[in-house]
Image (cartoon, grey):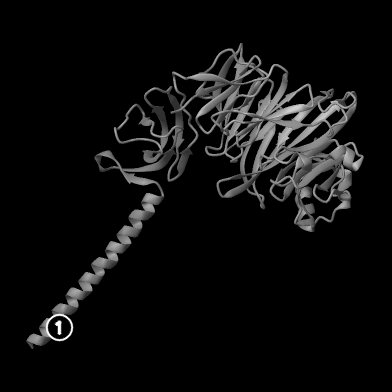
Amino acid sequence: MDSEKRARRQSIRLIISETVMVLAVVAMVVILAFLVSGYWLGSGFRVERQGMLQIGSMPIGATVAVDGEAPWYQRTNTSKVLTSGEHTVSLTKDGYDSWSRTVNIRDGLLYRVNYPRLFLLEREKETVYSSPATTLAVVSPDHRWMLVVNNTTAWRLLNLSNDKVEPKIISVATLFESVSMASGATTGLFTGEILELNWSEDNEHILVKSRLDEKVEWVLLNVKNLSESINITRQFATIFEDVRFFDSSASTLIAIKDSNLHRIDVSGRQISAVLIEGIQNFDVFGSDIIFTAAIDSKSTYDFSDEMLKREDELLTEERMVTPNYYTGIVKFNDVERINHITSSEEPIRAFISRFYNEKYITIINDTMITVYKYGGAETVFESALSFNPDNIKVSYDGSFVFMRSGDRVMTLDMEALELCNWVLDTENFGWLDGHIVYSVKDGTIIVYDFDGMNRRMLSNNVSAHFPVTIVENRWLYYFSDDKLIREIIAQ
């Protein structure tokens, strides 16, 4: 009898313990689900919805203050749970200027602010290069190299990441038609006008567009191996309206001739047949080209019924007008496949970008901006613009779209999905890095975050028409008259 009672008691204890374990697991799952959804137990044991702020800085180690409170342990780079709503975040560091902005924390979401830059208040500077004849300069995407152009055929390549900046001669005497050479001379005069200088992603090639009188020529400079440079215009005996890099190694180019798109094999010295007709504008992203073309050339391509149906849906009762242009994507690993996106009465400007793990298509049609998820019809953002931009840039990491007309600027922040309007101090502007804009007014460098916030004034006596750049997150380079100046901005 006693053994039966003991067995029953053991069974009861087992049932109770298993029940408690199950309830504990269920409770933990529920608690985790609430935490993931942004719920948190706040002051007074009240349940509040919260989000998370992730913040970094250059240099690292700045003190983070949220809504005026700065715990001694709170430093960048770090994350912090905050209640939903607006918060003022400030960064300070001994010996540096400060940074601040208001962020909108959303329920259960992560808000990333990884771009703030602080500048030393007391900065040492030195002259690292002198070039009285400099007419133009351009900095590579990695900010390590600068090509300095003068009115001779002996240009200079500077390595900005070295403690001692020593120029390498880039001889362009045989690469351009717009060159004047005396008999037997090795250095002549460059008589053309430089219209564009564009670096490749591998930081070793530069596409140069120049003009002499009415003749335009394109030259691909290989600054690491000059013998592999090529005059594109001369090689194909063709006047191209536009030429751009298609891959990071500059082995393939995309060119527009008579409004038709071609692909150029640089190493094979070959040009393809017409790939797309009636091109108005285009942008390259990976193996994709997104373009706008004249609608009457659409019949050249075989669109699926689903794509054509999408076009018909765009022609609403309020807008029963035959569109003149269409926008599409061509994949060059599958040249025949062309995806139709949208149609319009006016040329559309379109871009592909990647923000974290998602690809997006941004379309600007007159004064309307729309952002779609790549490969689908899902609209993630749509808004009217306050002006029709003539200068558009998608940041290298896809975190924002920068639109400008004169000194007026609009920025779409992909993190917050917010559009902000602001004004530059002058129309002369450039990029210090991927998130900071600068302009030079009355010889003074003025810097702003990409959305116009945190306006700060840096160095004086700066030449306005030469680039300003940051190298190794340590040095600030700029021209002052005919001298290249370097300042230490971080220790």
437 vs 406, nearest the viewer: 437
Number of labels in the image equals 1
According to the picture, the residue beneath numbered tag 1 turns out to be 7
Which residue is outermost to the bottom?
1
Residue 268 left/right relative to 42? right
Question: Callout 1, which amino acid?
Answer: Ala
Which residue is outermost to the left?
2
251 vs 124, nearest the viewer: 124
Find residue 134 and report its horizontal and vertical position in percent: 71, 20
11 vs 164, nearest the viewer: 164
243 vs 471, nearest the viewer: 471
Residue 135 left/right relative to 108? right
Find residue 190 and report its horizontal and vertical position in percent: 82, 24
Up-down relation of residue 149 to residue 256 (above or below): above
Please tell me whether mark 1 sits on a helix, a strand or a loop. helix
Q: Please name the residue shown 73% across and 25% down the image.
A: 149
Which residue is outermost to the top?
442
One can see residue 251 in this view: yes
Q: Please name the residue shown 28% across and 64% down the image.
A: 23
Neighbor class of circle 1 (other Cα within 10 Å; few <14, some 14-19, many 20+) is: few
Q: Please name the residue shown 16% across and 78% down the image.
A: 10
Find residue 259 and report its horizontal and vertical position in percent: 87, 39
One can see residue 450 in this view: no
Find residue 79 and report its horizontal and vertical position in percent: 39, 41
